[in-house]
Image (tube, helix red, strand yellow):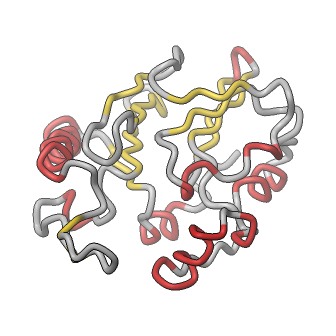
Amino acid sequence: MSWLISHKPSNTNIVFDLGIRQDTHNYPPALYERMQRLVRAEIPQEVFSSLQEANINPDSDIDTVIFSHLHYDHTGDPSRLGPGTKLIIGPGAKRFICVNAPGHPSGHLNLLVRAGLDERVYLTWDTTHDCAILAGMAHTAVYEDERTGIAKCAHEDKHISEEHISLARTLKESFHVEVILAHDSEWLAKNDSRFRG
């Protein structure tokens, strides 16, 4: 999932994450092979098609791209952006509140955005991959790595990640901030047109 944030007063377009690229065969061979075996992703539409549908030219109309972290399913294909697009990795954004979101990989970011006068949206990206975990009804899964036999999970540090999930839950429950996960296809289906235009 990617987000276009248009700041009308300054005529600025910012994209938060580029999502997964549609031409997965152009990923490095080891990653492409892993995707074929384990991660099977359907990408009916990538960020560049969505931008064009919104009459935004990725080559000239995107001022900044902020990456939440550098996993393949968030970096897309930055070579398709124009030479004037600024790429931000880490907490260098000034227009939004970039929140350090430890646990997934080091340097993982969340973004707190003011979406309206009294509306805040917290883009948690890979803080968790499951709404039930965010709600406190499930726990982060641990699995055995097929090559090493070592137990692992989707996060670099499960304990720290779970602490941050708890903070995101508090934002949602106590402060009525809308919390959105990167891989929440149900949220996307319900809200597909909500933030367009």
Please report the residue visible at 50 percent of the width from the left and 64 percent of the height from the top.
Answer: 188
Instruction: Please tell me whether residue 4 is drawn above or below residue 40 in the rendered image.
Output: above
**Residue 84 image-quadrant placement:** top right
Where's residue 118, x and y in %?
37, 29
Instruction: Name the quadrant of the N terminus.
Output: bottom right
Check the image and name the residue furthest to the bottom: 37
Where's residue 106, x and y in %?
34, 37
Task: Please name whichever residue, 18 or 159, is drawn nearer the observer in this view of the structure.
Answer: 159
Where's residue 69, x and y in %?
47, 42
Please report the residue visible at 77 percent of the width from the left and 28 percent of the height from the top.
Answer: 85
Seen in the image, is 98 located left or right of residue 171? right
Where's residue 151, x and y in %?
18, 70
Task: Please name whichever residue, 41 or 134, is drawn nearer the observer in this view of the structure.
Answer: 41
Please report the residue visible at 37 percent of the width from the left and 39 percent of the height from the top.
Answer: 122
**Residue 72 image-quadrant placement:** bottom right
Task: Please name whichever residue, 67 or 138, is drawn nearer the observer in this view of the structure.
Answer: 67
Instruction: Name the quadrant of the C terminus.
Output: top right
Please report the residue visible at 57 percent of the width from the left and 33 percent of the height from the top.
Answer: 66
Seen in the image, is 4 located left or right of residue 34? right
What is the count of numbered marks?
0
Check the image and name the residue furthest to the front: 148
